[in-house]
Every structure is written in C-alpha cells, then in structure tokens.
Image (tube, rainbow, N blue to C red):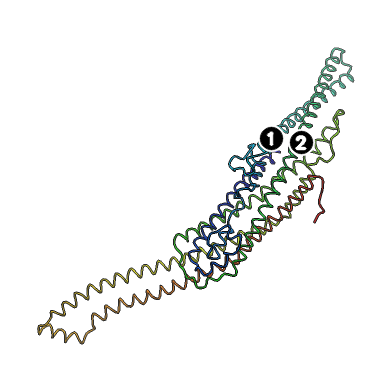
C-alpha cells in the first residue's frame, strides 16, 4: 500500500501539472498564431471566418495560424455554464476534501466537499496505517507463536525427564498464558484484517468508482474539444499565403521559441500523466494480488474468522483497468506531440536564419549610409575647391589629373558597390522571408491536423475505456472489443 500511496501522489501531481501544461500550450500557440496573423494578407480571411468554431474562438481571423490559435484554446479551460470535469477529477484524487484552486462551475455545489466523505488520499492513508498495524500484529504473533512452541517443547521434555510437579505446573501455566495471549492476538489480527477489507470494499472501491466516473466525463469533454480543434485545423489546407512575404519580428521569434519550450513541457507532462496513472493502478493491483490471498492463507488457524468474499468487487475493476491502460494509444499521442515540437524547432531555426540575414542587411545598410554621407561631404568640399581653382597652376594640375583616375568616379563606385551588395542581401532577405513563411505555414498545415487527430483519438480511447470501466463497476461488463 505504501507504493500505491506514493503512486497516487505522483498521479495527482501529474494530473494537475498536465492541466497547467495544456493551458500554457494553448496560450503559447495563440500568441504564436497572433504573430503569424500579422504576416498574412487580409485576402485569406475568408478561409476561416465562416467556421463556427473559429468565429467562437478568434476575432477576425485572417490566416491559417489564426485558426490554429483558435484551436489552441485549452480543454481544461472552464466555460460559463459548463462543468469543469478536470476540477472534479482533481477533487477526487487530491489530498484535500476539495480542490480550492479550481473554481466550481456547477452552481456552486460540490458533492466532494461533504464532510462525511473522506478524500481518496485519506482513505489510502487510513489503509496504510491499518496495514502497518497488521504488520506489527503479524510480527508480534509470529514471535508469540515461536515462544509458545518453545514452551510446549520444554513441557514435553520435562515430562519425558520426569521433572518435578512444581516445574511442570510452572511450565503448564506459562504455556496456558501464551496460548491465551496467542488467541487474543489472533482475534485482534482478525479484526485488523476485517478493517482493512472494510476500507478496501466500502471506501477505496467507491473512491475508485468516483475516479472512473470523473475521468470518463473529463476525457469525453477533452475528446469533443480536440475533435473541434481537428476540424478547425483541417480547414487551414484551403488557405494560400504565397503572396505574404512578411518578415519575422524579434518578438514573434521569441514567441515561437517560447512555444517550442512549452510544447516540450506538454510532452513531458503528458508522459508523466500516462505513466503515473499506470503506476498507480498497477500498484493497487499488485497490492491486491499480494494482500488478499496471503491474508486468507496466513490465518488458517483462526477458527472464528468470519467468511470473506472470494473475489472483492475491486478486483475485477483493477484487473480491467490495468488491461485497458495497456491498450490506450498513448504512444501515438506522444509521437504526435514530439513531431509537432520538432516542427516548431525547425521553424525556430528558419526564423533564426531570417533574423541573421536581416541583421546582415542592417549592418550593410548602416555602412552604405555612412559611406554615402562621407562621399557627399567629400564631394561638396571637392566641388568647392575645383570651382575656386582658376589659376594657371590649378589648370595645369587639372590637365595632369586628366591622365589619372577620376577621384569622384572612384569614390562613387565604392559607394555604389555597397549599394549593389545591399540590394542583393535585401533581395535574399525577402526571398528568405517568403521561404520561411511558406515552410512555416506548410508545416503547420500538415502537422497540426496530425497532432489534434492523435490527441482526439487518445481522448476518445480514454473516454471509451472509462465508460467500459463504469459498466464493470456497475456490474454490467461490456463485451470485450
């Protein structure tokens, strides 16, 4: 049970962290989309403006990434008039009787706040405490049993050796006392076992059923939202941004880099959510397998033990839960998130190249402006000198200079060379901007549908899994598919 308590703590923490990661991903994708909106022409606005989901989630969408930003609204976000199923799940598995950090959306009523109901975690803590008590009692009982057997062996040896009546009576009294204590200890142990089983069947099992119900509702809501996201991003394929060579700003680059880091965190928290849930259910299942049967067999000597159910109701639920968790397509969802993260990383690299090219253009432009000002200053002074040089010596110098290079042409050529280099670099920058935009949009058009399709399939499979578990808990095991 200690392993189960630890695993439950990790599962609860992972659930909360995943909610935060998903919300952050939605916000980051929205900010990234807003940066992309500025890069697209208004002519593409019709591509998403007519979609009901896009209209509900964005205002005046004008590009494919604007629709992507619309799809980024996190499923954990509460909507007025709707129940926050994630909050319900958190209140089922959290340490506290209610999860105060999440606002209630169901008219302020919260059944989990009822003081007569103890939380999932408290039930596990109580069971762990009773198991420790049982362990101490079993250990003490074994020591008592050894001492009792030792005294019985001593009594038999004394009888064989013909010990005195006084010695025999003392040993018989000790044996009788140990036997009485042993019976009392066995009865106490039996009561402890009964309490552990009562907690298991009357408190832990109902908490697991509540958790199943809450998870079923949450993943059903998640499926609806991810499916809507999929429909929105599928509409991006009809959009065309070939005539939108808008450059990437430093601010937009930072938002893209932020999105990359947040998507990596989303993947990490998704992996923890899946693995810690498996760990918890497997720990409970292992505890049940290693606990129920040994308790029954180790107390065979107890004649007064009450009859116990051969298969407690929790057993079928945990076995089915473990089996279903192995079939949920979580690897596909993980791969889709990793793939999307790689796409964003590629966009980051492309934007870095674009910004470096822009920086190069800025440096050449500064050099060109500096050389132009210097040439203009020099030419102004040079022209004045030539206008006042009317002497014969000046004319002679002019004649000699005719055979030499024209200083004006030479300096002007140097300035024009920089201008040509600037034009070439700016042309390269414009082409690079267009390439970055096309590759960015192309990658998003391809991988966003893959991402939300995988998340939709996972949410659907999870919802279906918990609906089947609900049927099992209600005594109506669905036909295995």
Q: Is residue 28 above or below residue 197?
A: below
Mark 2 crowdedness (10 Å alpha carbons): few <14, some 14-19, many ≥20: few
Q: Is residue 221 above or below residue 245?
A: above
In the image shown, does 377 or 470 lie closer to the viewer?
470
At mark 1, the secondary structure is: loop
**Total numbered badges shown on the rendered structure:** 2
Pointer 1 with pointer 2, Cβ within 8 A: no
Percent coordinates x, y for residue 280 in the rendering: 69, 45
Q: Quadrant of residue 315?
A: top right
Percent coordinates x, y for residue 37 in the rendering: 50, 63
Mark 1 crowdedness (10 Å alpha carbons): few <14, some 14-19, many ≥20: some
In the image shown, does 29 or 274 lie closer to the viewer?
29
Q: Quadrant of residue 47?
A: bottom right
Q: Earlier in the sequence, mark 1 or mark 2?
A: 1
Percent coordinates x, y for residue 191 in the rendering: 79, 28
Q: Is residue 378 above or below residue 306?
A: below
- The quarter of the image holding the N terminus is top right
- The quarter of the image holding the C terminus is bottom right
User: On the picture, is 308 further left or further right than 250?
Assistant: right
Residue bearing the label numbered 2: 202
Most distant residue in the top direction: 166
Question: CA separation, marks 1 and 2?
Answer: 12 Å
User: On the picture, is 285 further left or further right than 436?
Assistant: right
At mark 2, the secondary structure is: helix
In the image shown, does 189 or 178 lie closer to the viewer?
189
Residue in the image at 82% along x and 53% along y: 479
Residue bearing the label numbered 1: 118
Residue in the image at 50% along x and 71% along y: 435
User: On the picture, is 164 further left or further right than 240?
Assistant: right
Percent coordinates x, y for residue 112 in the rendering: 67, 38
């Amino acid at each position: 049970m200690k392993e189960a308590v630890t695993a439950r703590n990790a599962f609860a923490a992972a659930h909360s962290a995943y909610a935060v990661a998903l919300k952050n991903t939605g916000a980051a994708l929205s900010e990234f989309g807003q940066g992309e909106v500025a890069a697209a022409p208004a002519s593409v606005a019709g591509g998403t403006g007519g979609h009901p989901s896009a209209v509900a989630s964005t205002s005046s969408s004008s590009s494919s990434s604007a629709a992507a930003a619309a799809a980024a609204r996190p499923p954990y976000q509460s909507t007025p008039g709707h129940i926050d199923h994630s909050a319900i799940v958190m209140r089922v598995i959290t340490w506290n009787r209610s999860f105060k950090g999440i606002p209630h959306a169901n008219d302020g009523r919260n059944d989990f706040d009822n003081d007569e109901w103890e939380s999932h975690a408290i039930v596990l803590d109580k069971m762990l405490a009773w198991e420790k008590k049982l362990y101490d009692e079993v250990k003490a009982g074994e020591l008592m049993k050894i001492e009792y057997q030792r005294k019985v062996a001593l009594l038999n040896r004394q009888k064989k050796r013909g010990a005195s009546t006084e010695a025999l009576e003392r040993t018989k009294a000790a044996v009788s006392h140990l036997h009485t204590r042993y019976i009392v200890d066995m009865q106490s142990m039996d009561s402890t076992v009964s309490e552990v089983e009562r907690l298991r069947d009357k408190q832990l099992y109902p908490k697991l059923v509540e958790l199943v119900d809450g998870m079923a509702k949450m993943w059903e809501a998640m499926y609806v939202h991810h499916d809507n996201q999929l429909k929105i991003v599928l509409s991006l394929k009809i959009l065309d941004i070939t005539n939108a060579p808008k450059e990437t700003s430093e601010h937009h680059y930072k938002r893209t880099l932020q999105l990359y880091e947040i998507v990596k965190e989303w993947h990490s928290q998704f992996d923890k959510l899946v693995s810690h849930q498996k760990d918890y259910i497997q720990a409970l299942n292992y505890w049940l397998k290693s606990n129920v049967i040994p308790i029954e067999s180790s107390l065979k000597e107890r004649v007064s033990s009450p009859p116990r159910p051969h298969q407690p109701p929790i057993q079928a639920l945990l076995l089915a839960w473990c089996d279903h968790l192995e079939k949920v397509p979580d690897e596909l969802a993980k791969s889709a998130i990793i793939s999307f993260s790689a796409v964003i990383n590629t966009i980051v690299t492309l934007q870095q190249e674009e910004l470096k090219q822009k920086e190069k253009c800025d440096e050449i432009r500064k050099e060109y402006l500096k050389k132009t000002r210097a040439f203009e200053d020099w030419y102004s002074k040079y022209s004045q000198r030539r206008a006042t040089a009317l002497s014969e010596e000046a004319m002679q110098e002019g004649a000699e200079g005719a055979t030499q290079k024209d200083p004006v042409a030479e300096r002007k050529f140097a300035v024009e060379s920089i201008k040509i280099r600037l034009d070439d670099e700016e042309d390269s920058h414009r082409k690079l901007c267009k390439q970055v935009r096309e590759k960015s949009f192309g990658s998003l058009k391809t991988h966003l549908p893959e991402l939300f399709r995988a998340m939709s399939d996972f949410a659907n499979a999870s919802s279906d899994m918990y609906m089947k578990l609900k049927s099992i808990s209600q005594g109506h095991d669905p036909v295995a598919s």
